[in-house]
């Protein structure tokens, strides 16, 4: 079942199309890897799908809703959450506070009268256990290592209990132990029937995790299909190697 | 003793103004120089209502806060779309507009001559013409404002404000309509600043458009930078220091006209030193 359809999506920067009339479909409950050489438009696509950049043409169908413009504050309502290529946490807040922001009330009036409760504490604790950051709970995020920050950003996304997760290079800069944690998180999400769009350069991880692969080159769809088939294609290898 | 009480009252009034500004600058990361304007709106509303219409001070102060809140809502609808430089520039523009209105709408504000004879309130037989009682009143209001502001910043709303300060766009991804959060905190901060203005008008018993000049906003900003951004205790401590410290110049023996300039110089030097060596202020948790 399709949960997200990208239809002729166009995103230009100074006249240059970073995503060039791209059409693709994302299946529900699967891990779809989005790959391509640097500058192929992977992160731009995710940023456009989450309202960071306004789209210049085309549209998307998210869980049946046809959208021709996307506002960032609305994507959570469509069950979408994400991480960023460059970690974007709230650095002068604690690890715990970063998770609470994703766990607590969104309505303005409600949030004014809400202080975090035992349920929020419990949820945050479970997430911290999942990414092995319990002992960092009270520390400022700015003091964490890069890998810890990556893991916290993933935990913050999990706090949303979304249906669709966009992970933008979640393995970049991680130690092997941390990589194992993220692999298990992605496998758990799939087991729960969640949908994952994964931007990643590590082909071994893609073979291990992805159900489907979409290859972009110069903002256009180059190939898509099963990982083992797509990754063997000559045009895909050439796009990566620049031949 | 009377002198110390006088200084204490001023420190209390500016502590309220600083708490209001800290909500905006320290907790939300929105540097605004509009606070003199809201202070002045509160002061003028209270002055006009108590002198021309003989309305009781407490009601006049509440109405001052309401008028400031409405003004903040209107200007905030524009401001909340911006942040950083544009936010600051728009807030300066608003302060100039308010100053110009108070100078030129002479029928209402008495123009540059200002409004004199503002009465001190009498409440349940307590005559606040007595400075000791007035000081007590200011302390109670400082305590109340501090208590409510503390509840506010520790709420989920307050946490969202801090996240706006750190990375507004990242917060939006989590379903927060940040424009409204910025608008609401601007309105609340404006209303609190107006309460400080009403107290000031009632205490000094005279106001003129100089309460709405940019220097007042910069002074309030200096208080929170010195005391500590994103820490309400810092607002109170900063107000105490910056009100009390220049008073020491009186005992150095400068001529009156030079002492006034020295005061500005002292604020400037303190700000530069803190920016260089302790940018989060005495108690602050956040660096600009």
Image (cartoon, coloured by chain):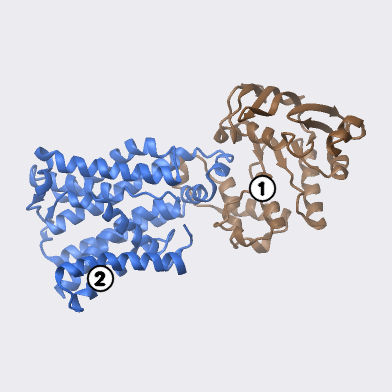
Chain colours: A brown, B blue
For mark 2, does the 10 Å Cα neighbourhood hold few (<14), some (14 to 19), or many (20 or more) residues? some
Q: State which chain disc 2 sits on.
A: B
Above or below residue B150? Residue B106 is above
Secondary element type, mark 1: loop
Q: Is residue A163 left or right of residue A205?
A: left
> Which circle marks residue A156 in the picture?
none
User: Picture quarter containing residue B232?
Assistant: bottom left
Does B68 appear above or below B131? above
Hey, which quadrant is residue A148 in on the image? bottom right
Q: Is residue B77 above or below residue A220?
A: below
Residue drawn at point x = 35 percent, y = 57 percent: B221
Residue A86: mark: 1
Quarter of the image that includes the N terminus of chain B: bottom left
Q: Residues within 10 Å of mark 1 (few under 14, many from 20)?
A: few
Q: Is residue A160 left or right of residue B184?
A: right
Pick the residue in front: A169 or B183. Answer: A169
Distance from Cα at disc 2 to Cα at disc 1: 47 Å
* Residue beneath disc 2: B246
Using the rendered image of the protein, determine whether residue B77 is visible from the camera's viewpoint: yes
The residue drawn where x is 81% and y is 27% is: A222
Left or right placement of residue A136 versus residue A24 in this view: left
Chain letter for mark 1: A
């Amino acid at each position: 079942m399709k949960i997200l359809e990208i239809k002729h999506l166009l995103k230009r920067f100074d006249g240059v199309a970073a995503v060039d009339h791209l059409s693709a479909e994302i299946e529900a409950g699967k891990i779809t890897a989005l790959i391509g050489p640097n500058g192929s438009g992977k992160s731009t696509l995710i940023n456009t799908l989450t309202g960071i950049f306004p789209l210049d043409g085309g549209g998307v169908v998210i869980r049946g809703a046809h959208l021709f413009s996307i506002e960032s504050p609305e994507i959570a309502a469509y069950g979408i959450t994400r991480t960023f290529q460059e970690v974007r946490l709230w650095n002068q807040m604690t690890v715990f506070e970063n998770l609470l922001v994703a766990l607590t009330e969104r309505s303005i009036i409600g949030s004014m009268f809400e202080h975090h409760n035992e349920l929020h504490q419990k949820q945050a604790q479970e997430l911290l256990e999942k990414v092995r950051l319990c002992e960092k709970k009270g520390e400022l995020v700015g003091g964490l290592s890069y890998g810890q920050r990556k893991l916290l950003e993933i935990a913050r996304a999990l706090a949303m209990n979304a249906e669709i997760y966009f992970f933008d290079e979640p393995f970049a800069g991680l130690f092997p132990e941390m990589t194992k944690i993220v692999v298990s998180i992605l496998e758990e999400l799939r087991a729960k029937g969640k949908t994952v769009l994964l931007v990643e350069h590590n082909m071994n991880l893609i073979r291990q995790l992805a159900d489907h692969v979409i290859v972009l080159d110069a903002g256009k769809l180059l190939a898509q299909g099963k990982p083992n088939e797509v990754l063997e294609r000559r045009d895909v290898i050439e796009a990566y190697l620049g031949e | 003793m009377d002198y110390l009480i006088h200084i204490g009252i001023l420190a209390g009034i500016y502590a309220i103004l600083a708490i209001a500004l800290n909500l905006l600058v320290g907790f939300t990361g929105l540097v605004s120089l509009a606070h003199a304007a809201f202070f002045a709106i509160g002061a003028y509303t209270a002055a006009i209502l108590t002198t021309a219409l003989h309305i009781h001070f407490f009601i006049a102060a509440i109405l001052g806060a309401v008028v400031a809140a409405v003004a903040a809502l209107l200007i905030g609808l524009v401001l909340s779309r911006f942040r950083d430089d544009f936010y600051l520039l728009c807030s300066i523009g608003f302060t100039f507009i308010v100053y110009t209105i108070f100078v030129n709408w002479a029928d209402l504000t008495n123009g540059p001559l200002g409004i004199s004879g503002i009465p001190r309130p009498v409440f349940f037989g307590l005559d606040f013409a007595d400075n000791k009682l007035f000081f007590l009143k200011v302390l109670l209001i400082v305590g109340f404002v501090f208590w409510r502001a503390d509840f506010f910043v520790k709420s989920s709303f307050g946490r969202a404000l801090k996240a706006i300060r750190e990375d507004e766009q990242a917060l939006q991804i989590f379903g927060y309509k940040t424009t409204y959060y910025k608008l609401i905190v601007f309105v609340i901060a404006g209303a609190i600043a107006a309460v400080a203005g009403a107290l000031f008008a009632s205490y000094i018993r005279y106001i003129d458009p100089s309460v709405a000049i940019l220097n007042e906003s910069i002074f309030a900003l200096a208080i929170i930078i010195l005391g500590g951004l994103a820490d309400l205790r810092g607002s109170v401590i900063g107000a105490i220091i910056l009100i009390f410290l220049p008073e020491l110049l009186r005992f150095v023996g400068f001529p009156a006209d030079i002492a006034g300039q020295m005061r500005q110089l002292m604020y400037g030097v303190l700000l530069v030193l803190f920016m260089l060596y302790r940018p989060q202020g005495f108690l602050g948790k956040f660096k600009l």
